[in-house]
């Protein structure tokens, strides 16, 4: 597939991307401040012209997805995040929470055409789209992408398995979009019903995990699938190419991986929360904390696309837990670490049985002295208002899984 790219943005140099995105970032910050009431408040003290790099971006506050329910209840319908009046949007969606999302009138507003192109969708293809068209935007992610690429779309939506199989037999679509598990169901049902489903040879899947075993089962049924990763708030974040080695970050966003509970970027390769800034003009989210976990991969994709890659979805970042009746947040663990530069990384492990909780901070440090352990205990109590134990461990010994608070209690 050498040279078969959606556009030249995918193969620009790292320096060119940083320069062009930096200029666009400053403009987007200015636009968000001027047009979005919520960002006018959170970015009140920010000079947009100075925000032209990742380093400058990292100093801005994170707006977390978990805050949207409250924001939108206080300032309906979109929490003041939108940059255009609700009536000037193309669509307004509702995801579980409930959380409402606005779609602008731009062509391919969610930018999914890039991921569909990477998955082999081309003008003249017939796409069987089984993502939902009601309430949530997933169906329109694919629909707008396919119209941009010149594909015809069969809006199958979810459910009605036998009817959808009959449609496959009649229309002979050659592309699939939807969850991988439903694709497997459709292909197996086609065999059961004696209907030829072999027209479906390529697919773009998302919305759930795609373990190697499921990908192999779908391939055995005749369809090669690639994954995309997006959210209802942001649209496309990253996507697979034929190389199938990680997920390439979309050109329309800036992705940071931060330590859960903070806005602090972690080193490449370390697992943390996915924080995204989008260049969407209608819904200009700046440093939006998705709550998803991932990590930046080393090097460039073998397919030739030059943007950074992430490992895909690796769990959820919200690890808040209740200890002895009080909530303890990942951000509090980060506050403890910041007080002690000798500590490189830490994980708070909660053990015992409910009502008899024990907190132990496992802290990576070359200093294993009693003085550091005692100081950490004092910081734990000062920050969380709870007593905690400390276990000093060697640097690099904690798992690279992004876990900041581990609930290891027995609930039997």
Image (cartoon, helix red, strand yellow):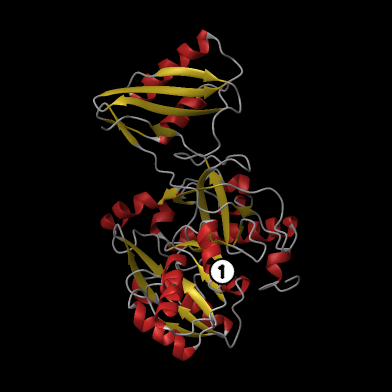
Residue 256: x and y, percent?
Answer: 56, 49
Binning the other alpha carbons within 10 Å of mark 1 as few (below 14), some (14 to 19) or many (20 upward) gives some
Q: Is residue 116 above or below residue 31?
A: below
Identify the residue at image location x=58%, y=81%: 149
Residue 125: x and y, percent?
Answer: 56, 85
Left or right, 249 with respect to 193, comes to right
Closest to the observer: 151 or 73?
Answer: 151
Left or right, 75 with respect to 214, comes to left
Residue placed under numbered mark 1 in the picture: 219
Q: Quadrant of the C terminus?
A: top left
Closest to the observer: 220 or 294?
Answer: 220
Identify the residue at image location x=57%, y=73%: 116
Most extreme residue toward the top is 370
Mark 1, secondary structure of its residue: helix
Q: Is residue 99 above or below residue 136?
A: above
Residue 317: x and y, percent?
Answer: 44, 44
Left or right, 379 with respect to 238, comes to left
Identify the residue at image location x=64%, y=57%: 245
**Quadrant in the rendering for residue 92:** bottom left
Does residue 29 appear in the picture of this structure? no
Q: Is residue 152 above or below residue 55?
A: below
Residue 25: x and y, percent?
Answer: 59, 58
Closest to the observer: 45 or 144?
Answer: 144
């Amino acid at each position: 597939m050498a040279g078969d790219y959606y556009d030249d943005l995918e193969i620009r140099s790292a320096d060119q991307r940083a320069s062009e995105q930096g200029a666009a970032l400053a403009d987007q910050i200015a636009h968000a401040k001027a047009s979005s009431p919520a960002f006018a408040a959170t970015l009140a003290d920010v000079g947009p012209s100075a925000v032209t790099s990742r380093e400058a971006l990292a100093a801005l506050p994170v707006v977390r997805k978990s805050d949207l329910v409250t924001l939108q209840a206080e300032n309906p319908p979109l929490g003041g995040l939108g940059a255009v009046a609700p009536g000037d949007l193309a669509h307004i969606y509702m995801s579980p929470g409930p959380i409402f999302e606005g779609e602008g009138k731009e062509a391919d507003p969610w930018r999914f055409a890039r991921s569909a192109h990477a998955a082999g969708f081309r003008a003249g293809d017939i796409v069987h789209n089984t993502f939902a068209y009601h309430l949530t935007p997933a169906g329109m992610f694919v629909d707008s992408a396919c119209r941009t690429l010149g594909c015809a779309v069969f809006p199958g939506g979810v459910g009605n398995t036998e009817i959808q199989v009959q449609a496959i037999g009649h229309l002979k679509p050659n592309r699939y979009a939807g969850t991988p598990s439903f694709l497997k169901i459709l292909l197996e049902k086609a065999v059961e019903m004696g209907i030829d489903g072999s027209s479906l040879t390529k697919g773009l899947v998302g919305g759930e995990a795609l373990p190697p075993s499921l990908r192999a089962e779908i391939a055995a049924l005749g369809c090669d699938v690639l994954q995309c990763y997006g959210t209802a708030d942001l649209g496309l974040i990253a996507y697979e190419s034929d190389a199938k080695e990680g997920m390439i970050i979309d050109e329309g966003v800036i992705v940071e991986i931060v330590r859960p509970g903070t806005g602090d970027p972690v080193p490449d390769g370390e697992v943390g929360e996915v924080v995204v800034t989008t260049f969407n003009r209608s819904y200009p989210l700046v440093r939006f904390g998705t709550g998803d976990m991932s990590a930046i991969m080393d090097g460039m994709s073998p397919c030739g696309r030059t943007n950074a890659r992430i490992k895909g979805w690796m769990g959820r970042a919200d690890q808040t837990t209740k200890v002895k009746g009080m909530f303890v947040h990942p951000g509090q663990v980060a506050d403890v670490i910041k007080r002690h530069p000798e500590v490189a990384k830490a994980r708070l492990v909660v053990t015992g049985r409910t009502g008899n909780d024990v907190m132990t901070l496992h802290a990576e440090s070359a200093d294993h002295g009693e003085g550091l352990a005692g100081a950490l205990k004092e910081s734990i109590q000062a920050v969380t208002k709870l007593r905690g134990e400390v276990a000093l461990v060697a640097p690099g010994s904690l798992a690279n899984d992004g876990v900041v608070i581990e609930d290891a209690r027995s609930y039997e």
